[in-house]
Amino acid sequence: MKDSHNDSVQKLQAYLRGELDEDEIRKLRAEIAQDAMLEGKLEKLMFDELLAGDPDELPALSEQKQRQILRKSKWRSRFSHIFFTTGGITAIIVTLLILSQVFNYLWFWPASKDFQRVMEDVVTFTNPGMSVGGGGTNGGLFFSMEMKYDLEEKVGRERKSVGKAENDVFLFKPQFKYAWNQGFHQNRLFFHFPPAVQQSKADTPGVTSAGWRTLEKLPEGTVAQLAVSFDRLMTHDEYFAIIRKYDLDTTWLAIDTGQEGQEKGTLGKGEVWGYDTEAHFLFADGSLEVNGQGERRSQLLIRELEYLDSQKALATSMLEDARFRPAPKLGERIDYLKQHGVKLYGAVITGPTKELLKLKQETRFSHPYVGQVEWWNWDQAGTYGIEYSY
């Protein structure tokens, strides 16, 4: 079998060198026409000759037949090259996808709870009147995952979606951002630190009453958000003793962490530090009394800040992405709270507009800022249906 192969190759080589007579050439052409394997051997020999030398030295097959053989050989070579190239690329992609899924299963999914918790804390601690609603995490391709959660504000009894908190993670590097409904969000809730409250009361009394005038102009059948500042720092229990006298809900509390007094003028999103009164960490160990249990709230708050500090790299990255302007200094804030206790200097409150207006009589509340206003929903919680488009 081997000798037969060698004989045919030698005969084809002699043919290519022009060493066969007319009768041998005629017989060989007939054999080539009947034997595809023999034709394939001739194609290979001719193509090798084409690459190695001068194509004009190829034998006297008809010019058309030579072109056909060479064209077929070239295309076979191209397809072979394409096949192996694309096959190699496909193998690399498939391998990366498999490794990515293994990576997600072993590392990303266990870590996703920390990413979600830190993201909720960043929203809760730095956005007056805002909380994190429903959402979820999706594993992406190539060592990535995507997190999207609703951003909500409570106005009256209802929580309204104002956008989404989005976190795109690649190789444990988060890219956090706010995606607001309609592309923007109006920040209307601001605070004044107690020394600034005292100063503005003396210098610009008109500023301290602008929000009250707004509430007076709103109709009876509405609910609203209201941010108020305190004339001095209060404990939770001191604040609750005042607010529980009114038919109102507290949605967010501004806390003194030792950094706020360094800022001048109004403090808003990106400058204040506080927490949503329905934040996840407050209920991890059970329920809380409404407008009560101030000491327990303080302990839970410090515990959550310590957790956030344990995720310092992650938290700092998200805070920077969220444009929190002062340096986070989580360790310093925690030390300050442990040393001085948790004290409040402002609150975001919601409820019937005219009930909010009653807070004007509280001499320790000032600098009211009116946020969102909605039609009456105070005594109809949970009675609304949702109709979808089909």
Image (cartoon, rainbow, N blue to C red):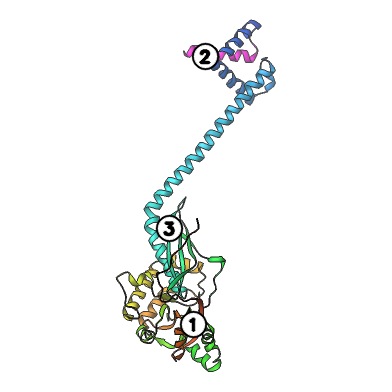
**Circle 3 residue:** 137
Separation of residues labelled 3 and 2 (CA atoms): 66 Å
> Which mark is on residue 220?
1
Query: Going by the picture, which residue comes out furthest to the left?
Result: 286
Q: Which residues are magenta?
A: 1-18
Using the rendered view, name the quadrant where residue 280 is placed: bottom left
* CB contact under 8 Å: marks 3 and 1: no
Q: Earlier in the sequence, mark 1 or mark 2?
A: 2
Q: Earlier in the sequence, mark 3 or mark 2?
A: 2
- Classify mark 2: residues with Cα within 10 Å, few (<14), some (14-19) or many (20+): few
- Classify mark 1: residues with Cα within 10 Å, few (<14), some (14-19) or many (20+): some
Nearer to us: label 3 or label 2: 3
Q: Nearer the viewer, residue 14 or 326?
A: 326
Residue 327 painted magenta: no
**Circle 2 residue:** 6
Query: Going by the picture, which residue comes out furthest to the bottom?
Result: 202
Q: Position of residue 189 (x, y in %)?
A: 50, 78
User: Tag 2's secondary structure?
Assistant: helix
User: Tag 3's secondary structure?
Assistant: strand
